[in-house]
Amino acid sequence: MPAPFLFAMNDLKANPQLENGYTRIANELFEAIIEYPFTCAELRIILLVIRRTYGWKTSKSFISYGSVA
């Protein structure tokens, strides 16, 4: 894993809880994403698409270039 993505759990300021919301994703899709060697930029775009679709319980969404950049 690239060094910029390494952090200690106690470095997190937030206290994420399932009660505050979560994004459901099929295990098969999640496993495929984990196993494929995406670049960091590709993975960020994939996660954005998942958040804007699965996270908002919709099958499609308009995503502006600005939200990807």
Image (cartoon, rainbow, N blue to C red):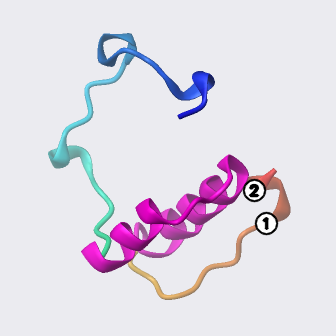
Q: Which mark is residue 31?
A: none
The image shows residue 48 at horizontal and vertical percentages of 58, 60
The image shows residue 41 at horizontal and vertical percentages of 72, 51
Q: Nearer the viewer, residue 10 or 51?
A: 10
Q: Amino acid under label 1?
A: Ser
For residue 29: magenta?
Answer: yes
- Give the structural element (helix, strand or loop) at label 1: loop
Q: Residues within 10 Å of mark 2 (few under 14, many from 20)?
A: few
Query: Which span of residues is magenta-colored?
Result: 27-56
Q: Image point 59% across, 65% down: which residue? A: 46
Which image quarter: residue 22? bottom left
Which image quarter: residue 29? bottom left
Q: Which residue is mark 2?
A: 68
Q: Which mark is residue 64?
A: 1
Q: Amino acid under label 2?
A: Val
| Circles 2, 1 touching at the beta carbon (< 8 Å) | yes
Q: Nearer the viewer, residue 41 or 63?
A: 41
